[in-house]
Image: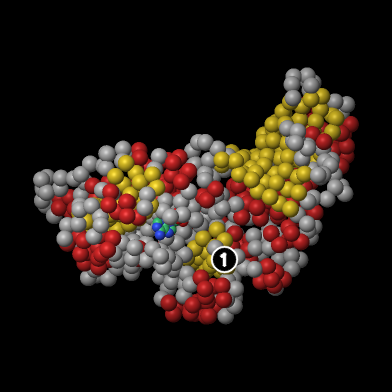
Amino acid sequence: MSVISSWNLTISLNTTLSLSWRSSLPSRAIFPRPKKSKTLVVLAIALGAKPTVLVSEKLGDAGIQLLKTFANVDCSYNLSPEELCTKISLCDALIVRSGTKVTREVFESAMGRLKVVGRAGVGIDNVDISAATEHGCLVVNAPTANTIAAAEHGIALLTAVSRNVAQADASVKAGKWERNKYVGVSLVGKTLAVMGFGKVGSEVARRAKGLGMQVIAHDPYAPADRARAIGVELVSFEEALTTADFISLHMPLTPATSKMFNDEAFSRVKKGVRIINVARGGVIDEEALLRALDSGIVAQAALDVFTEEPPPQENKLVRHENVTVTPHLGASTTEAQVLLELSPYVALTEKLGRLAVQLVAGGSGVKFVKVTYASARGPDDLDTRLLRAMVTKGLIEPISSVFVNLVNADFIGKQRGLRLTEERIVLDGSPEKPLEFIQVRIANVESKFASAISNSGEITVEGRVKDGKPHLTKVGSFGVDVSLEGSIVLCRQSDQPGIIGKVGNILSEENVNVNFMSVGRIAPGKQAVMTIGLDEEPSRDALKKIGEITAVEEFVFLKL
Ligand SMILES: NC(=O)c1ccc[n+]([C@@H]2O[C@H](COP(=O)([O-])OP(=O)(O)OC[C@H]3O[C@@H](n4cnc5c(N)ncnc54)[C@H](O)[C@@H]3O)[C@@H](O)[C@H]2O)c1
Ligand SMILES: O=C(O)[C@H](O)COP(=O)(O)O
């Protein structure tokens, strides 16, 4: 799905609601789940059957194609409010960006059919959340998908205003050569105030530090340790205003931030300050900014966002000589629109859950499950609800007839006595990758494959995403490496020559293709765990023959 890095559940339906919704869906007998369910399309997961999805703004093609495997997709762009209201009654889901106003009228016109609004991006200020809640409609967004794109656009505008790039470009194109008029200011050593030190703000800060700037930030809710880690000082609104040479805005538009930059704020800034806004137009009082520009208090402004979008033709800010404008392009990079950042992890978590539960010995029951996410990203930047739901799905579906989806996962887990806890390990390193590894552990159970019990006494499976594909990288205390496709044979044997060949022969006699194989051992000549990825399912007879190889101490066949 375009821009799905993780769909963030903005409004969770309460349990009663999600249950009644679920029970109103057709049974699996009528709509069997696709064999290779690409569970990353959360809307489809949430809806549980082939829904009709209206996409009202341009998204990446890859996302649309993927969505089409799960849904009837209607891409209708530039709908008038009336056209949107007419169409919506035929749709189960609506996907929008910032340009579609999802008003109360839209929810009313849906007459109960609309179940999910997906905001392919961050800001949900164009969706009437109260109306969505009243109409039992879920609103989900993709909070990290365009973070880097927005941060890079902020930096592009910062450097552009410091060197009059837009103005100089227009001048040269008008046939002029005004080298003295467009003398800029340097960034190095200057103070940048980042207002709103969240996902985008902190990435802007990181980049500005690289440009040699002194970076301060104002954010009443930001953790001081995150700021310290980047070398940024958190300051009061007053201090940010009075000390900054450049101000970059990155807070959401809320009643508290609306027109935060007004005459009062501009009266306290340093004369000649330069302002960049890639957040929301509404955080600036545009009339006040115009006055501040005209009086020279603000030397330059770069605006990607406006109170009204598109801004009216006669908008004086847009036409102002010292204002650089872009048409809400912050998220508009190819990468941000096709990013499938979390999707392999979604598949990985479900498969780890499936593997772990199949390793439990019959009768043990599964109650205590711990999921560990190791990531270089801050906890706020990784919403794990989707991953948690997928682990639950993997744990429960192989041993029951229930269909687990994003909405009902927590409820079904609780109903079945599952106590799933999550833990994060914060790693050093590049935060570009969402997760380094994921571990699923089941405590207080016996395993049908004793080697799957780690030193801590729990069934432990660990996986990573390699080249975009989920891999199993640890079973119990043994390091392994097998791509999680098809099915898997885990086999512990005494470490001696010829075993791999014997197992391979048995499988090849049955025409079962081995797609991956790895061997992890404690020490040479002792025990080894062999992990074999299979495209086809071997017969019982073949599995029996593997078990009869003298050196094989235990083995298990697992379906993914
Ligand atoms: N121009 C674009 O295309 C584009 C792209 C992405 C994001 N955005 C916008 O950028 C903004 C930031 O996005 P994000 O993903 O970093 O969100 P975020 O939620 O990660 O960060 C927002 C930060 O603002 C802080 N904040 C809240 N109230 C504040 C206040 N009164 N003063 C200062 N800080 C305050 C929050 O504590 C939070 O840390 C949003 O408005 C989003 O819609 C625009
Ligand atoms: O909130 C956002 O995600 C950004 O403003 C991007 O909006 P867009 O998806 O309309 O480009």
Q: In this view, does 408 lie to the left or right of 142?
A: right
User: Is 514 placed above or below 106 here?
Assistant: above
Residue 260: image x %, image y %?
34, 63
Give the crowd class for mark 1: few <14, some 14-19, many >=20 residues within 10 Å: some
Q: In this view, does 15 lie to the left or right of 310?
A: right
Residue in the foreground of this view, choosing between 422 and 430: 422
Residue 111: image x %, image y %?
57, 80
Residue 288: image x %, image y %?
25, 65
Specify the color scheme: secondary structure
Q: In which quarter of the image is residue 456?
A: top right
The amino acid beneath tag 1 is Ile
Count of numbered circles in the view = 1
Q: Can residue 559 be seen in this view?
A: no
Q: Is residue 112 left or right of residue 211?
A: right
Q: Identify the residue shown where x is 79% and y is 25%.
A: 527
* Residue for badge 1: 11
Q: Identify the residue shown where x is 83% and y is 50%.
A: 365
Q: Is residue 256 visible?
A: yes
Residue 309: image x %, image y %?
34, 67
User: Is 528 placed above or below 142 here?
Assistant: above
Residue in the foreground of this view, choosing between 297 and 103: 297
Q: Quadrant of residue 21?
A: bottom right
- Kindly state the secondary structure of the residue where label 1 is placed: loop
The picture quadrant for ligand 1 comes to bottom left
Q: In which quarter of the image is residue 30?
A: bottom right
Q: Is residue 349 left or right of residue 338?
A: right
